Image (cartoon, rainbow, N blue to C red):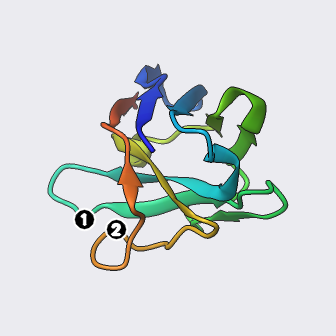
Amino acid sequence: VQLQASGGGLVQAGGSLRLSCTASGRTFSTYAMGWFRQAPGKEREFVAAITWSAGRTYYADSVKGRFTISRDNAKNTVYLQMNSLKPEDTAVYYCAANKFSLPQVSGTGGPEYWGQGTQVTVSS
């Protein structure tokens, strides 16, 4: 599975962005997908995940109520709608994929596949 993320950019606090991640491969629908982020000087952290059937979603406490993850298996694409953005959301955002379920850790035991990252900058 190869992942291509897009949609990052510069936005003012309180604004919105939508990230997209398109996957190659015929078995996209059997993979759980998600997003992680990494701010300068910090470890990569879990943001959101969605099961392969889109039946369940998971969020980090820091983004609950502001971010929404969704997927379109027909387009092999997962989305992250980010609303009410804060300066502390500034980071490189990475999409990730893993068979059936997505680990919420980025190191050992983390997702098998990663996208290249897209920069999100929120100005105050």
Q: Look at label 2 and name its amino acid.
A: Ser
Q: Nearer the viewer, mark 2 or mark 1?
A: 2
Please tell me in which quadrant of the rendered image residue 26 appears. Answer: top right
Tags 2 and 1 in contact by the CB under 8 Å rule?
Answer: yes
Could you tell me how far apart the alpha carbons at marks 2 and 1 are, in whole angstroms? 9 Å
> How far from the left and from the top, in percent, is residue 77?
63, 33
Residue lying at the far bottom in this picture: please name it: 109
Q: Which mark is residue 43?
A: 1
Residue lying at the far right in this picture: please name it: 55
The reply to whether residue 83 is in sight is no
Location of residue 110 with respect to 36 vertically, above or below: below
> How far from the left and from the top, in percent, is residue 70?
73, 43
Residue beneath the point at 54% across and 30% down: 22
Mark 2 sits on what residue?
106
Please tell me in which quadrant of the rendered image residue 124 appears. Answer: top left
> How far from the left and from the top, in percent, is residue 93?
39, 42
> How far from the left and from the top, in percent, is residue 91?
33, 43
Residue beneath the point at 37% across and 49% down: 114
Q: Which mark is residue 21?
A: none
Give left or right: position of 5 versus 49: left
Q: Look at label 1 and name its amino acid.
A: Glu
Give left or right: position of 38 versus 77: left
For label 1, the crowd category at 10 Å Cα-Cα, with few meaning under 14, some 14 to 19 and many 20 or more, is: few
For label 2, the crowd category at 10 Å Cα-Cα, with few meaning under 14, some 14 to 19 and many 20 or more, is: some
Quarter the N terminus occupies: top left
Secondary structure, mark 2, is loop
